Amino acid sequence: MGPRARAMHDFLRDRAGRRVQPWARLWAEGHGEVWRGDAEYIERRRERWWGALLDG
């Protein structure tokens, strides 16, 4: 899940850098920061996620 969230952040950043809409607007509104934060949260808790997914 972390790599997917990170990929969304990178996608938004790249498209915004090229001024492609709606990505540039979403980036300006802070969506990139949210995706980056989500990716970092998931990555910091990777072991917990694995445990919840595999033990459930």
Image (spheres, rainbow, N blue to C red):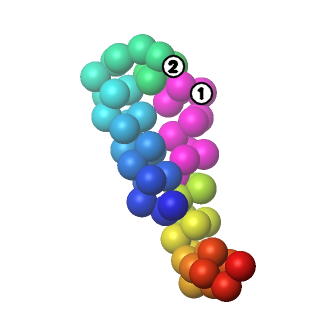
Residue 29 tag number: 1
Camera-side residue: 56 or 25?
56
* Secondary structure mostly seen in the magenta stretch: helix
Is 53 magenta? The answer is no
Which residue appears at 42% of the width and 34% of the height? 12
**Which three-letter amino acid code belongs to the residue tagged 1?**
Glu
Q: Is residue 14 left or right of residue 6?
A: left
**Which three-letter amino acid code belongs to the residue tagged 2?**
Arg
Indicate the quadrant containing the C terminus: top left, top right, bottom left or bottom right: bottom right
Residue 26, horizontal then vertical, whole percent: 53, 25
Label 1 secondary element: loop
Q: Is residue 6 left or right of residue 51?
A: left
Against 43, is 6 above or below? Answer: above
Say whether residue 45 is visible: no
Say whether residue 40 is visible: yes
Against 44, is 18 above or below? Answer: above
Residue 25 tag number: 2
Q: Distance between the residues labelled 2 and 1?
A: 6 Å
User: What span is in magenta?
Assistant: 26-36
